[in-house]
Amino acid sequence: MIDPVILRTEPDLLRESQRRRGESVELVDELVAADEAKRSAQTAFDELRNQQKVLGKQIGPLQGALKQATHAERAGLQAQLDGLLATATLLADQVKDAERAASAAADVLDALWLQVSNIVNLDSPVGGEDAFRVIDHVGTPRDFAAEGFEPRDHLAIGELLGAIDVERGAKVSGSRFFYLTGPGAMLEIALLNLAMQQATAHGLVPMITPSLVLPSAMEGTGFLGQAAENVYRLEADDLYLVGTSEVPLAAYHADEIIDADRLPLRYAGWSSCYRREAGTYGKDTRGIIRVHQFDKVEMFVFCRPEDAEAEHERLLSWEREFVDALEIPYRVIDVATGDLGSSAARKFDMEAWIPTQGTYREITSTSNTTQFQARRLRIRMRDENGTRPLATLNGTLCAMPRIIVALLENHQQADGSVVVPQALRPFLGGRSEFTPVG
RNA sequence: GGAGGCAUCGCCUAGUCCGGUCUAUGGCGCCGCACUGCUAAUGCGGUUUGGGUCUCAAGCCCAUCGAGGGUUCAAAUCCCUCUGCCUCCGCCA
């Protein structure tokens, strides 16, 4: 949600943001009208309610006086009381109507606000998915031709190693499900440990979060807008399966006011993630690049709004540190306005080189959601200037399947074995490579 | 799953039976001021959150006693539903 003050003072800022995203600009005009309607309805109710209270305050004492009154006074007082009650009855109806009108106007306004995406950062490249800006390249893709062999894709290697089983995944759960077996499972556990070691070294608080959440948590983080079709919903219980622990981590502090001197609060959440992958039919059908369920370590930060951009850079640097440690070649992109998702004002993705695809594929994503999620979740901070919504940011530390894909493909040997990067070896009992099973 | 109890403005707490002088009590903590060699103590004032009005501020108004409905001229208080926590019983990894 956006600061309503911006709607009244700088609506053009909102319009420009909507334009850059390729979303409705007319929505802003609807909002202006709805905001006006809501305020006048609220004011009307406030005034009537005030009259009602003033009137009500006379009734109690009058009834008291009536009880004490002498017989002579009684008739006059009774007439006065009857008059007041008659007026009050009429007023009560008006108050009820005004209250209903005000609440209806507020509902209209709220519904419109929920449709508005975050205001984009003016530095984000403008355009659709392909309009990203490349910020950096790190590492050099291996020249397999020069090494004299054709690289196998991650699934072929995973099967050789006895690490990945997609056939049985499909048998048991359907397409886009998989088992990590033996060395594959050990690899994920090692990655988890490396990620958590790095995270705690930087002072992030490790968290294991729920992966089922209430609608309010899902809506508060902005996943029930355009992203809704990718969310699993448990109809019988009205719960959602999260697509990332960003959701339970963001909602962790919902409805709280946090003292500014406790900020920033930084967490590293470990959870399973569930995605319907609607509209991706036929894409990435082989292997585990695109799956319905996977595990991920996600970083999440609550900070002062003025610190958010610096914090965003910090999250990106931690993501890079992790991937650097795994010796995977990658590039960093500044995601274009049309591809940000509703919550992000700015987003940086890291894309790993995938040899058998001859291209870079997304492995991490870090978003500055500014005050957008905090407003929706009512998370505020208190400092010397009072209370105001804080800023939230998120970033992938380790999305298991894609990191495993990048590791297997980039560190494979001609015989199908895979070299374990140095940083990971302590978490695999010193093991330096995985070798094909007989 | 069953039975009972509880939920008040940072924390604790009064008020709820019996609706109106509740504009929600008091203590602790915190902030400001005064006094005082310093600290402490003491005194006075302030201290939920959101919204509206207003050029700003002050002031004023509305809402807010876990949430949502209802009864009533009027609800912290009465009624209903829901949520959370606690106790007991049953079942279970």
Image (cartoon, helix red, strand yellow):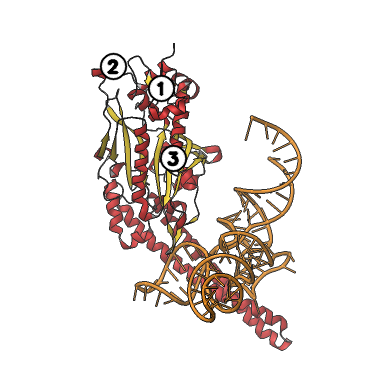
> Which sits earlier in the primary sequence, circle 3 or circle 2?
2
> Which sits earlier in the primary sequence, circle 1 or circle 3?
3
**Amino acid under label 2?**
Glu
> Which sits earlier in the primary sequence, circle 2 or circle 1?
2
Please name the residue shown 55% across and 38% down the image: A236
**Amino acid under label 1?**
Ser
Please name the residue shown 31% across and 34% down the image: A351
Asked whether the residues under marks 2 and 1 belong to the same chain, the reply is yes
Residue found at the far bottom of this picture: A72
- What residue would you read off at disc 1? A432
Q: Is residue A177 above or below residue B50?
A: above
- Measured from the top left, where is residue A84 in percent x and y? 59, 78
Which of discs 2 and 1 lies nearer the camera? The answer is: 1
Chain for disc number 1? A
- What residue would you read off at disc 3? A199
Depth check, front residue: A257 or A33:
A257
- Measured from the top left, where is residue A244 in percent x and y? 44, 38
- Measured from the top left, where is residue A23 in percent x and y? 31, 47
- What residue would you read off at disc 2? A150
The CA span between labels 3 and 2 is 36 Å
Q: Element type at marker 1?
A: loop
Local crowd at mark 1 within 10 Å, few (<14), some, or many (≥20)? some
- Measured from the top left, where is residue A190 in percent x and y? 46, 29
Chain for disc number 2? A
Chain for disc number 3? A
Question: Within the image, what quadrant is residue A431 found in?
Answer: top left
Q: Element type at marker 3?
A: helix
Instruction: For residue A79, say whether it is visible.
Output: yes
**Amino acid under label 3?**
Ala
Q: Which mark is residue A166?
A: none
Local crowd at mark 3 within 10 Å, few (<14), some, or many (≥20)? many
Please identify the quadrant where the C terminus of chain A is shown.
top left
